[in-house]
Amino acid sequence: MSKTIELAQDLISRSSISPEDGGCQAVLIEILSDSGFLIDNLKFGEVDNFWATHGSSGPVFVFAGHTDVVPVGDRKKWLTDPFIPTIKGDLLYGRGASDMKGGLASMTVAAVRFVNDFPNHKGTIGFLITSDEEGPAIDGTVKVAHHLKGIGQKVDYCLVGEPSSTSRLGDVIKNGRRGSINGRITIIGKQGHIAYPHLAINPIHLAIPVLKELCDEVWDEGNEFFDATSFQISNINSGTGATNVTPGEAEVLFNFRYSTETTDEELKEKLCNILAKHELNYDIDWGITGDPFLTPPGDLVTGCVSAIKDVISIEPELSTSGGTSDGRFIAPILGAQVVELGPINATIHQVNENVSVKDLDDLTDIYYQILKNILL
C-alpha cells in the first residue's frame, strides 16, 4: 500500500466534523516537520489552522486545504463505518475520502517526495491548512490569509486540493469561482381577516410581481470564463398557518452567484431599484460569502495542465462553475494565482463517500510534477 493511501486512511479514521480537527493537523505537521518544513500553528477562536514552509525565497507555491468534514448523515445507510476507512475493490470509503482528506494525503506525500528529491529547490513550498472550511469559515483560511498579509508573507501560486474532477481524475481544473451574495427581503403588509381584504395589505400579493421581475432580470451576460450572473430564490415564508388570516409580512431568501462582469454593489443597487419601482415597504439584509476570482492561463494553469498531460495523458477543462472554496479568500487577500485541482467530486457530502485508490496515487504524481514545473 502506498504512503498516500496509508495517510489518507489515517486522516479518515479521525472524526473531524467541522470545526473539529480530530488530530488530523498534528499528523500532517509531524510528517512535514520531519521533512524540514517550518510550522506556525495559528489557532483563531476554536479553530485549528497551520502554516508550513520549506524554503525562503520566491516564488512561493502553496497547497491549501481543510481537515474538517461535513456530518455523516444516516449511519445506517453507510456500507461501512464512515470513520473506519475501508477499501472495497479500487475504492476507499469514508467521510472525507474525496472532500478532502484524500487530497491532503496526496499533496503532503508529493511535497515530502519533492523536498527529499530536490532539497535545494528554488522558491518556497507552503501549506495553508484549516479546520473551518465546511462550517462558517470565519476563523479559518480568511484569518490565516489576513495574518500572512499582515506579516508580509507573499504567495504567488496556490493550489487548493478540493475535489474538482467530474468524470475522471484531472478532467477539470477550477481556475476561478463565482461570487456569492445572500439576501433576505422582508416585505411588510398589514395583517387582517381574509374576508375583508380592503382592511389588510397582503404582502404575498405584493411580492409576486416583484419576484417575477427579479427572476426575469438579466444581470449580466457573463464572459469567456463565467456564465451569466444567476439570481435564485431559496425560500419564501409567510402567514400564520391559519387559512383565514392575511399575513402581515412575507420573507424571501435569495442568492446571487455572480461573475466578474459585475460587482456586489452594482447587484445590490439594481435589486433595490427594482424594489423601489414597485413602491414596497420592505427591509433587506445582505451577506456576502465571497467575491469572484479568476486565474487566467499563466504559469500556474500551464503548470497544472502540463502535469496532468504528463501523468495521465488527458487534456483538462478550465472551469469556474460550482460553489465556493477557500480560494475566495486566498486570491483577493494575498493576490495569488489560485486553482482547484483534486479528486472526482461525485460522492462528496454524500452517504458512502469514496475515492479511487488509483486516483489518489495518480494525484500524488500530478502534484509532484506540478511542483517540478513551478519550482525547478
Image (spheres, rainbow, N blue to C red):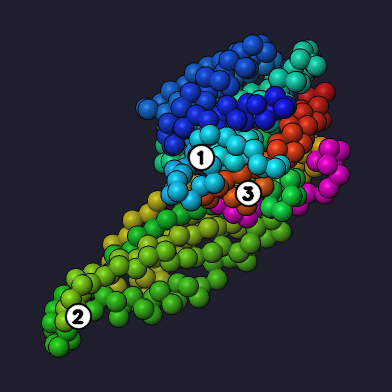
Residue at (76% x, 21% y) in the render: 114
x and y percent of residue 354 in the render? 61, 44
Quadrant occupied by the C terminus: top right
Q: Alpha-carbon distance for marks 1 and 2?
A: 45 Å
236 displayed left or right of 247: right
**Which span is picked out in magenta?**
308-330
State the quadrant of the N terminus: top right
Residue identified by numbered label 2:
243
Magenta highlight on residue 91: no
Is residue 41 in view? Answer: yes
- Can you identify the residue that label 1 sits on? 82
Depth check, front residue: 241 or 330: 241
Q: Is residue 27 above or below residue 132?
A: above
Q: Earlier in the sequence, mark 1 or mark 3?
A: 1
Please, what secondary structure does the residue beneath circle 1 have?
loop
314 magenta-colored: yes
Q: Amino acid at mark 3?
A: Asn
Disc 1 from disc 3: Cα separation: 17 Å
Position in image of residue 47 (x %, y %): 42, 28
Q: Which residue bears the numbered disc 3?
A: 345
